[in-house]
Image (tube, grey):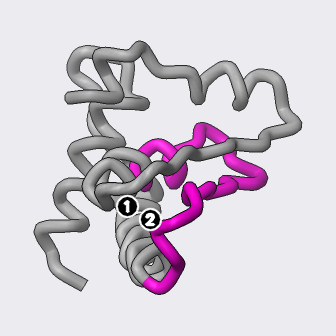
Amino acid sequence: MPESLVAEVERRLDRLFIAAEAATLRREDRRKAVEVAAMLVEIKIAANRLSRRAPLILVDAAAGKSCVGLLAARRVLETADRAARVITIEGDPDRARSSRVLPNERRE
């Protein structure tokens, strides 16, 4: 997996979820960036295998802060040149609230 993809995921996680001015990603966040980058590669491979005739729907179940869904929407689905959407499912109301991002953050 390209290091540039992991670095991009780290930057996006930092922008989306680190609120404090001087704070940075924790060690576990950096490990998560590697895992998320690997998932993005797999999502892209799967999306490329599917017919372009029907819209693509990605379900991010047990989404937590929805980092996979949000980053897949930005990195994979927006560039796929096809109709697509992401549905996130999270049972914990606090986590679900933290997954909401201002529209200008999504477009960065």
User: Compared to 1, does 67 lie above or below?
Assistant: above
**Left-right relation of 95 to 47:** right
Q: Position of residue 84 (x, y in %)?
A: 50, 50
Asked whether residue 44 is drawn in magenta, I would say no
Q: Split into 4 quadrants, where in the image is the N terminus?
A: bottom left
- The residue closer to the viewer here, 106 or 10, is 106
Q: Is residue 49 visible?
A: yes
Q: Quadrant of residue 15?
A: top left
User: Compared to 22, does 16 lie above or below?
Assistant: below
Q: Residue furthest right?
A: 91
User: Compared to 93, does 54 lie above or below?
Assistant: below
**Left-right relation of 77 to 59:** left
Residue at 79% x, 40% y: name it: 90
Q: Amino acid at mark 1?
A: Ala
- The residue closer to the viewer here, 74 or 85, is 85
Measure how far apart labels 1 and 2 are at the Cα level: 5 Å
Q: Quadrant of residue 89?
A: top right
Residue 33 tag number? 1
CB under 8 Å between discs 1 and 2? yes
Q: Magenta stretch? A: 49-72
Residue at 69% x, 55% y: name it: 59
Q: Residue furthest left?
A: 4
* Label 2 Cα neighbours within 10 Å, binned few <14 / some 14-19 / many ≥20: many
Residue at 71% x, 30% y: name it: 95
Is label 2 in a helix, a strand or a loop? helix
**Left-right relation of 61 to 87:** right
- The residue closer to the viewer here, 18 or 70, is 70
Q: Position of residue 74 (x, y in %)?
A: 33, 46
Q: Amino acid at mark 2?
A: Val
Residue underneath mark 2? 36
